[in-house]
Structure formats: C-alpha cells, structure tokens
Image (cartoon, rainbow, N blue to C red):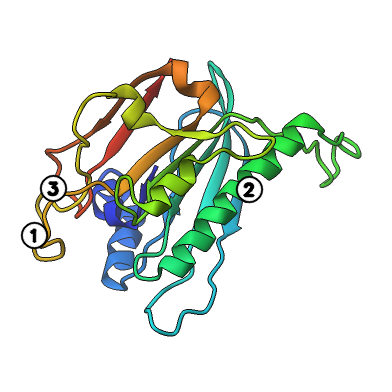
Amino acid sequence: MFNGDAAWTAGSTLPASCAKRARCAISMRQFGNAIVTRLPVRQVLRHSLPWPADPAKPSMMRVALEAVIDTDIGAIRVISTHLEFYSEKQRFAQLARLRELHREACNHARAPAKAEKIDSPFSDTARPMSAVVCGDFNSAFESSAYCRMLEPIADAPRFIDAWASAHPRAPRAPTAGLYDHEQWPEGPFACDFIFVTEDLTSRIAACEVDAVSEASDHQPMWLELH
C-alpha cells in the first residue's frame, strides 16, 4: 500500500509504460492511493471522503481505497487513505466517515444479503469485520484526531494503533521530517499510522517504520500479521 509520495520509488519497479505514467503523475503534481497485493482480492471499493467547505484553508478532495483481501488468517478489509493536511474541519469529517464506513461494513458482516443470482450485479453483501486502515492521517501522534480514531465504535470492533501495540513502552518512531527539513522545520514526528481492529491485536507479529529510506518526505511502514 502506498500513496503518491512513493510513486517514483514504486514506478521504478514497474514496466516501462507504468513507470513513465508514475513519473508523469509527479510532474503534474498528482497523487492518490493504491493497494498492491499478491493475494486474492474479493472486492474493491473507492470511498469519497467528506469535503466540507473551509474557505480559510487550501484543500483537495480525499478518498479511501478499500480492498477485501483473502489471507491465510481469513478475509480482511484493507483501507488506504490520505487525509486533509490544512483543514482540521475536513480532517475530522473524514475521520468520522472512516469510522462510519467501518460500522457499515460490520453491519453487513452481521446481516448479509444473499446474491440475487450468480451472474447478477446484486451480489452477496457479506463483508469481514476485521480491518486494517493505514495511511498519512496528517495528524500527530496523540493529537485529538489520532485519539478520535481510537474511540469505541457502536456495534463494531474498535481500532487500535498497530505500532503502539507492537512497541508498548518505546518512544514513538517518527514517520515524517527525518530528512526533509525544509518542509518539516519542526523536526521528526509521527503522522502516518496503521490501525487494526482489536480482534487482530493478538495477530500482530511486527509493525515497523523504515527510518533509512529517503524516497519520500514520509517513511514507509509495514505490518506483519500471523
């Protein structure tokens, strides 16, 4: 999973035509979200996130990309997102929508509708409750937005911070500002997170930040579930 900040690095490993498109996207100042997997994908959903008017702040439309992936520990919803940077109003609206989407998916998991027929677009609505939500949240560790993501959700398993669960007594590893001091003059801090539903907590084998990579102004993260 990566956002547009990593397009150049990812593009270098793709076929020439795809790599060219990745470089063009950077030159046109475009970016987005992608999920790349070797595992079977059941379903892909693109969720437009709220964009309430905030005339005092520059902003752009944001999305959450979701894939239901079959894994050896069962089906998991994987969501990649990149929340608003400048507008706190928009960022909180987007967080609320992510939590609402999670509750909606859990309701479908609890009470699925059967498919109309095999070849019908009205397919089985069953969804897994287990989920991973990751990306650049543009919210500092322990900020009000970060804490909001961890609050209980009615009729759905709550989210936990996978890195914090894997490192309960360690200082928070920064994910931005390690190398790009012009954009981040305040120094290194964490604003990229991997949240998992609480049922996956016992399956967290590792969650780390790559502090060596200079491919982006943000550091890559990875999660290993067993």
Cβ–Cβ under 8 Å for marks 3 and 1: no
> What is the x, y in percent for residue 188?
14, 50
Cα distance between the residues tagged 1 and 2: 36 Å
Q: Residue at x 58, y 47 (%)?
A: 99
Look at the numbered disc 3 and give the secondary structure of its residue. loop
Residue corresponding to mark 3? 214
Name which residue type carries label 1: His
> What is the x, y in percent for residue 195?
44, 37
Q: Is residue 81 above or below residue 23?
A: above
Q: Residue at x 47, y 32 (%)?
A: 196
Viewport quadrant of the C terminus = top left
Return the disc, 3 or 2, that comes first in the chain's sequence: 2
Residue 165, label in figure = none
Residue corresponding to mark 1? 181
Specify whether 31 is left or right of 27. Answer: right
Residue corresponding to mark 2? 101
Q: Residue at x 48, y 69 (%)?
A: 61
Cα distance between the residues tagged 3 and 1: 12 Å
Viewport quadrant of the N terminus = top left
Q: Is residue 116 above or below residue 63?
A: above
